[in-house]
């Protein structure tokens, strides 16, 4: 790591080879929008070429039957795996490249070879359950990579912050009984996939290390910034992670065609500044991002630009306004509901 301003980006034209039917929102052009944003930072990023994840790496999270089901899709022109999820002949290979690229990027940050980075991969991963594909996702990239960090890099406690607009059911289920991985999610609710209500807080030894922040439609920069400052920050301080992973969907952007949130480019920038600051405070700056959703060119371009701009700047950017918790506001309601579930575990929850 010669230049502390450089961050690593995993990208590859092969990520465009996974294709669903015409008109499917999770389409190859998504990565063209991401590339357009990355082009503005070419002198501040270093590219790395992904490799296919090995079966043993995928099988740390997924069952063998699921691996076999995805592998067999390579034998047919098209396979429908769930109501929204398709594979073509190349999808098995591309899904392995997505997981493998994410693993290697996260490792390079864990081991200090890169200051930070973003895995600009597809298909996304956070809906994939251990035994099935779901919600455009084949293998759960962030879960597979988190397990690789623990197994191979000596990283013990990991915080996964999932700010995709959908709840990451697959990631939650992968770690809900495991106190070594804290899964934190903001998501529109009620909405697809239906999981992620306040009371879903982990099971058994993992009770308390699942933190769900379901949010009503219409939330934007103020609410997201408030949630990260007033909920994520105290939770992260209480948990004390050794590395922070961001399941980085851009579908809470106001231009996104699927969901109904109102984040702007500067909102994503402020969120990135907040999580960067938490990583600096708690885990030696070790933080890395993996692309999840985001379905308009504008949401993907602006979101990518916000994240990369913040992560490549020498000084932390603006973390946004810290408004009061106005009585009757959405933010107040959200914070009170989360505090009712988790307030006893995480000192300071609710305060900014
Ligand atoms: Zn999403």
Image (cartoon, rainbow, N blue to C red):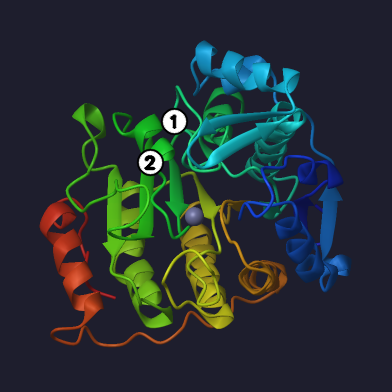
Q: Which mark is residue 169?
A: 2
Residue 128 x %, y %: 49, 35
Is 203 on the left or on the right of 38, as rendered?
left
Secondary structure beneath dot 2 equals helix
Residue 165 x %, y %: 44, 60
Secondary structure beneath dot 1 equals loop
Q: Do the CB atoms of the residues marked 2 and 1 lie less than 8 Å apart?
A: yes
* Residue at the image point whose x is 74% and y is 28% from the top: 77
* Residue at the image point whose x is 47% and y is 26% from the top: 132
Mark 2, Cα crowd under 10 Å, few <14 / some 14-19 / many 20+, is many
Asked if residue 5 shows in the view, the reply is no
Asked if residue 290 shows in the view, the reply is yes
Is 303 on the left or on the right of 128, as rendered?
right
Is 180 on the left or on the right of 81, as rendered?
left
Residue position for label 1: 129
Q: Ligand 1 closer than 8 Å to the CB at disc 2?
A: no
């Amino acid at each position: 790591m010669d230049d502390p301003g450089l961050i690593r980006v995993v990208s590859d034209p092969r990520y465009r080879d996974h294709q669903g039917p015409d008109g499917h929102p999770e389409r190859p052009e998504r990565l063209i929008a991401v590339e357009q944003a990355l082009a503005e930072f070419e002198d501040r990023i270093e590219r790395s070429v992904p490799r296919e994840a090995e079966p043993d790496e995928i099988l740390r999270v997924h069952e063998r039957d699921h691996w076999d089901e995805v592998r067999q899709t390579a034998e047919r022109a098209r396979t429908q795996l769930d109501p929204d999820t398709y594979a073509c002949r190349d999808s098995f290979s591309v899904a392995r490249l997505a997981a493998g690229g994410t693993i290697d990027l996260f490792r390079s940050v864990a081991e200090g070879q890169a200051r930070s980075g973003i895995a600009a991969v597809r298909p996304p991963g956070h809906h994939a359950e251990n035994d099935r594909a779901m919600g455009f996702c084949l293998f759960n990239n962030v879960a597979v990579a988190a397990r690789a960090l623990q197994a191979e890099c000596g990283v013990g406690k990991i915080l996964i912050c999932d700010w995709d607009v959908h709840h990451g059911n697959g990631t939650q289920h992968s770690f809900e009984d495991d106190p070594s991985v804290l899964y934190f999610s903001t998501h529109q609710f009620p909405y697809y996939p239906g999981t992620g209500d306040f009371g879903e807080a982990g099971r058994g030894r993992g009770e308390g290390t699942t933190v769900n922040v379901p949010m009503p439609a219409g939330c934007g920069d103020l609410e997201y910034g408030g949630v990260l400052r007033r909920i994520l920050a105290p939770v992260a301080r209480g948990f004390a992670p050794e590395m922070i992973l961001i399941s980085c969907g851009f579908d809470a952007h106001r231009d996104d065609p699927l969901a109904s949130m109102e984040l702007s480019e500067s909102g994503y920038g402020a969120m990135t500044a907040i999580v960067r600051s938490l990583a600096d405070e708690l885990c030696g700056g070790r933080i890395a991002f993996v692309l999840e959703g985001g379905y308009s060119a504008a949401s993907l371009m602006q979101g990518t630009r916000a994240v990369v701009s913040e992560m490549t700047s020498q000084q932390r950017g603006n973390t946004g306004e810290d408004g009061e918790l106005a009585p009757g506001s959405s933010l107040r309601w959200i914070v009170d509901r989360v505090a009712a579930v988790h307030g006893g575990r995480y000192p300071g929850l609710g305060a900014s």
